[in-house]
Image (cartoon, rainbow, N blue to C red):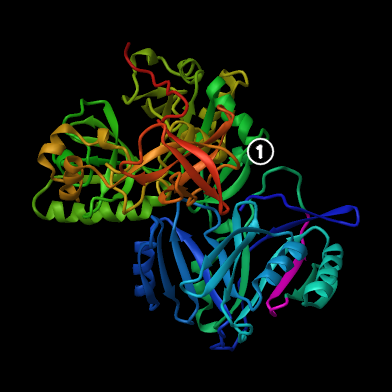
């Protein structure tokens, strides 16, 4: 969650953040959940996989995974062995997987006002469901939902039980926060349960209180650092059975000590990198410059990204090409040695397991890179099929390049800067081509590709030489190429119209629907032979029912899951990625709409926090690509 919310009180400001905490009462084996607590919501890149994990661990699946009614979001509902309900929602990689809690209230308008006034939250959206006799108020900060307050028609009271404990909120002044709560409680109800002050023997300053419905909030004083962008988590505390403490802690807690670190981690920190959890890694989201400035600088000069969290691997053997073709849509056999392509790993239903850049190094060596958030499922998928392939006599083996780091050098200065560090003539290496060569004194895998739409390279370097290479690149650029984080990387790929797996591509979206028909080789369209080929080939013949398109929009930027309506108010699709374009100075987005509604220039209404804003469908990329190709 990213926000910098300020609540004005008596001429000063109270900064608020939220975070996660789980605690256990020793010796207690069970608790009463009550009927007022609803569920926790957890985001995951693969709902289907998590559901199977829940089953294997003894949980109960109460709603099988699949798209929500009338939408494309994949959800499921499960209960853990202690009886807590969890909504699982499929999203892209996020540093805040535990993203909200649903609580039932007896007076929704009163509850909304309380959290607005007492905690500075905003009503992000209001969902009316008269056919099911309930209304939900989504409360949070900026675009990030913290609470889903649910009112069931005619029900004014609920049992609280003793299992759910509280929401924990950070503030920079518990005394001023306490004053706010007292004033609001006199108007709307609720009361202070612990006066502001330090905890005995610890010194941490807290204040706690109940809202009008009896739900507890604890505020803890946190010393804030300066800066406009914060990597913050939201937290629900709950009591857990002692018998399950270790398992549940592993499942839901991710401390900084648990995160993997790339070879450049300390280098990032020393250069002002703001480190955040991402796909199990500690990664820089930005540096000292703003995300907007960093995005623009990439297109004007250049950027250096640490993408070592991604997984590089090699397939080798005389049958490695034919093996890979059973899993991806690309014509791997048709690639010339030293060339590559974007491709998609598909499942039996034609959906995307992941997208990947693959390179045919030789006829008996394939090099590919898969997404960090998909690493575990991708490797398991490849390994499962490789065992079956080898059992039938196929000659293929693999090596995962955990000994290497991956850097991405992007922008107009990428080639001239890198040329200073190698004797090879980079002007002869075109977009999509691959070479093993010496760079800055170490043997590197070099691919002319990237995720920004700019000319550039991805450099696989032995990890022990990664810092030296990064330093050399920055020095040779004379300060024009900057270290760049995940925030600008996302803006750049969106401007380039490139998919983010988990947002714009998922297990129920086919390459045809995603606008990646060009990645399906001509021979593969005729022969098939990959998982889900029957579904995909039929879509190629008949056309898909939905299509990925680009949007320009007015008002606030559209975000993932914003609904797209036609001019008559009928829902025709959904946004999957959106934001403000630093280079175009306007809102851009991509998403899916029904076929027939996808024509460029089609006017639409895009709902942001329930309010419709003017938009129109446009071609992608939004910013012209500058790939280095033969003239």
Pointer 1 residue: 270
- For the point 54% across and 28% down, which residue is it? 303
Residue at 34% over, 68% down: 52
The residue closer to the viewer here, 151 or 391, is 151
As rendered, which of 321 and 341 lies closer to the eye? 341
The residue located at (72%, 75%) in the rendering is: 211
Give the residue drawn at x 20%, y 28%: 335
The image quarter in which residue 102 lies: bottom right
Q: From the viewer's perspective, is 55 left or right of 453?
A: left
Indicate whether 613 appears above or below 128. Answer: above
Is residue 217 part of the magenta span, yes or no? yes
Camera sees residue 135 = yes
- Image location (x, y in percent) of residue 520: 22, 36
Question: Tag 1: Cα neighbours inside 10 Å, few (<14), some, or many (≥20)?
Answer: few
- Tell me the quarter of the picture where residue 217 sits: bottom right
Which element carries disc 1, helix, strand or loop? helix
Q: Which residues are magenta?
A: 212-223
- In x, y percent, where is residue 21? 63, 68
Q: Is residue 143 left or right of residue 403?
A: right
Residue with the most extreme top position: 631
Where is the C terminus found, in terms of image quarters?
top left
Q: Position of residue 524 (x, y in %)?
A: 15, 38
The percent coordinates of residue 504 (x first, y second) are 40, 45
Residue 523 to residue 134: above or below: above
Depth order, front residue of 424/389? 389
Tell which residue pokes out farthest to the right in this image: 10
Picture quadrant where residue 300 is located: top right
- Residue 199 in view here: no
**Total numbered circles:** 1
- In the rendered structure, does residue 117 fall within the stretch colored magenta? no
- Nearer the observer, 429 or 625: 625
């Amino acid at each position: 969650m990213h926000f910098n919310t300020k609540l004005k009180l008596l001429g000063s400001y109270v900064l608020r953040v939220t975070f996660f905490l789980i605690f256990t009462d020793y010796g207690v084996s069970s608790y009463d959940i009550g009927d007022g607590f609803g569920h926790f919501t957890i985001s995951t890149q693969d709902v289907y996989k998590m559901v199977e994990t829940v089953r294997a661990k003894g949980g109960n699946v109460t709603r099988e995974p699949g798209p929500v009614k009338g939408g494309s979001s994949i959800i499921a509902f499960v209960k853990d062995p202690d009886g807590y309900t969890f909504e699982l929602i499929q999203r892209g990689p996020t540093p805040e997987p535990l993203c909200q809690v649903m609580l039932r209230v007896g007076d929704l308008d009163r509850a909304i006002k309380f959290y607005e006034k007492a905690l500075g939250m905003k009503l992000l959206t209001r969902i009316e469901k008269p056919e099911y006799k309930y209304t939900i108020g989504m409360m949070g900060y900026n675009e990030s939902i913290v609470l889903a307050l649910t009112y069931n028609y005619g029900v004014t009271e609920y049992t609280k039980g003793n299992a759910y404990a509280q929401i924990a909120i950070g503030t920079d002044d518990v005394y001023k926060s306490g004053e706010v709560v007292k004033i609001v409680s006199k108007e709307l109800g609720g009361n202070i349960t612990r006066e502001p002050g330090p905890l005995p023997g610890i010194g941490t300053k807290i204040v706690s209180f109940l809202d009008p419905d009896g739900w507890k909030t604890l505020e803890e004083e946190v010393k804030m650092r300066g800066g406009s962008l914060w990597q913050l988590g939201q937290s629900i505390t709950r009591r857990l059975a002692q018998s399950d403490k270790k398992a549940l802690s592993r499942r839901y807690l991710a401390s900084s000590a648990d995160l993997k670190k790339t070879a450049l981690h300390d280098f990032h920190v020393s250069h002002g990198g703001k480190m955040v959890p991402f796909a199990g890694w500690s990664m820089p989201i930005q540096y000292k410059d703003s995300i907007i400035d960093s995005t623009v600088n990439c297109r004007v000069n250049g950027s250096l990204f640490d993408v070592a969290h991604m997984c590089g691997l090699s397939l080798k053997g005389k049958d490695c090409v034919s093996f890979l073709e059973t899993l991806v849509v690309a014509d791997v056999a048709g690639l010339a040695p030293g060339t590559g392509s974007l491709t998609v790993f598909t499942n039996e239903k034609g959906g995307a397991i992941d997208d990947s850049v693959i390179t045919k190094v030789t006829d008996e060596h394939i090099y590919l890179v898969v997404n960090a958030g998909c690493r575990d499922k991708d490797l398991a998928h490849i390994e499962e099929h490789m065992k079956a392939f080898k059992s039938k006599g196929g000659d293929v083996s693999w090596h995962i390049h955990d000994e290497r780091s991956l850097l991405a050098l992007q922008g107009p200065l990428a080639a001239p800067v890198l040329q200073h560090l190698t004797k090879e003539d980079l002007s002869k290496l075109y977009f999509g081509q691959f070479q093993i060569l010496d760079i800055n004194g170490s043997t590197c895998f070099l691919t002319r590709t990237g995720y920004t739409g700019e000319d550039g390279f991805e450099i696989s370097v032995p990890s022990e030489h990664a810092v030296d290479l990064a330093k050399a690149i920055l020095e040779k650029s004379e300060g024009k190429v900057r270290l760049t984080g995940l925030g600008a990387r996302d803006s750049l790929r969106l401007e380039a119209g490139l998919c983010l797996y988990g947002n714009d591509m998922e297990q129920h979206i086919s390459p045809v629907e995603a606008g990646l028909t060009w990645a399906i080789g001509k021979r593969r369209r005729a022969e098939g032979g990959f998982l889900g080929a029957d579904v995909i080939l039929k879509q190629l013949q008949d056309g898909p029912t939905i299509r990925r398109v680009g949007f320009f929009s007015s008002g606030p930027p559209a975000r993932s899951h914003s609904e797209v309506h036609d001019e008559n108010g009928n829902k025709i699709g959904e946004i999957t990625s959106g934001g403000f374009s630093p280079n175009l100075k306007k809102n851009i987005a991509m998403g899916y709409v029904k076929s027939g509604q996808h024509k460029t220039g089609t006017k639409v209404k895009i709902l942001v926090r329930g309010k419709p804003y003017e938009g129109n469908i446009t071609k992608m990329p939004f910013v012209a690509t500058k790939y280095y190709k033969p003239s």
